[in-house]
Image (tube, rainbow, N blue to C red):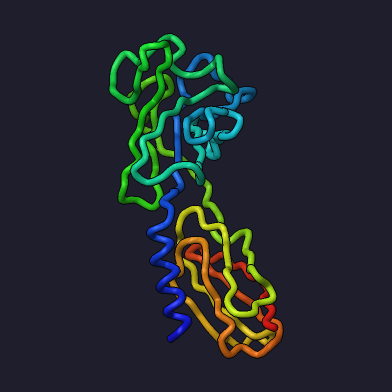
Amino acid sequence: MKKYYFLAVFMMLGVLVGAQIPVTFAVDMNDVPDFDPTVDVMRIGGDFQGWSPANTTMTDDDGNGVWSVTVTEGIDAGQTILFKFVINDWGTNEFIDGAPATGDCYIDDGAGNVNRQYVIPSDVTEHMMPIYLYNACEESTLSVSVKEISTIQGIKVSPNPIVGVSVVTFENPTNAAHDITLSSITGQALRSWNGVTGTSLEVAKGDLPAGLYLLTFQNELGEIGAQKLIVQ
């Protein structure tokens, strides 16, 4: 029962500490005369990434004119964010001539700065923004194609070798559920954790004999990842 106690406590802490979520931004660039998709690149400048368009580059994976990017750091559930869509870099961005003619998607500070303003819902673990028309508050009727983000990259164990308790960390930008198995080097399953979300898991040495073990991850997409664990 001890291992389940560690897992339950850790998952409760994961809910209480930090609420950053992946947020997908999208913009419809069809019918924008100053944009050439063969040479221009769409970016975002926002308060959540230092107002640096180079930090957030968008793509149009299906070629339908809707450019998108999923930001996995810097945005919390319930946060109010400010941003603009940018063609290449500052100077060729939205709202250069002032606020949109209609709509209330922006805030004007009265000093010549007009930015999109958006409140992220407080009860979500990921969020898809509206697909806006460039330089306007109106929303597009098109859809966006967003590539799936792998949820089991960067698996690390610290400390490794394990002496008492080690922390296993892994990338999980969409807060997906994982089935995790601890196996001997011969493939015998010794412990398992099902439906693990978040980005961390505590593993106690317990009664494991000294030796080499394998932690295997499988997510909802069917992707599999693994990391070696040494017990002293």
Query: Residue 36 occupies which quadrant of the picture?
Result: top right
Q: Looking at the picture, how far across and down is residue 156, in whole percent? A: 64, 65
Q: Is residue 130 above or below residue 110?
A: below
Q: Nearer the viewer, residue 49 or 215?
A: 49
Which residue lies at the image location 37% right of the left edge and 20% below the top edge?
136
Q: Looking at the picture, how far across and down is residue 51, in whole percent? A: 53, 28
Q: Looking at the picture, how far across and down is residue 151, in whole percent? A: 54, 58
Query: Residue 52 occupies which quadrant of the picture?
Result: top right
The N terminus, quarter of image: bottom left
The single residue placed furthest to the front in the displayed view is 164
Task: Tell whether 110 sits left or right of 150.
Answer: left
The single residue placed furthest to the left in the displayed view is 103
Q: Nearer the viewer, residue 153 or 3?
A: 3
Which residue lies at the image location 55% right of the left edge and 29% below the top edge?
43
Report how many numbered discs are placed on residues in the image.
Answer: 0
Task: Tell whether 200 sits left or right of 188.
Answer: left
Q: Is residue 172 above or below residue 67?
A: below
Which residue lies at the image location 61% right of the left edge and 75% below the top edge?
215
Which residue lies at the image location 42% right of the left edge and 67% below the top edge?
11
The C terminus, quarter of image: bottom right
Q: Looking at the picture, how far across and down is residue 133, in whole percent? A: 40, 25
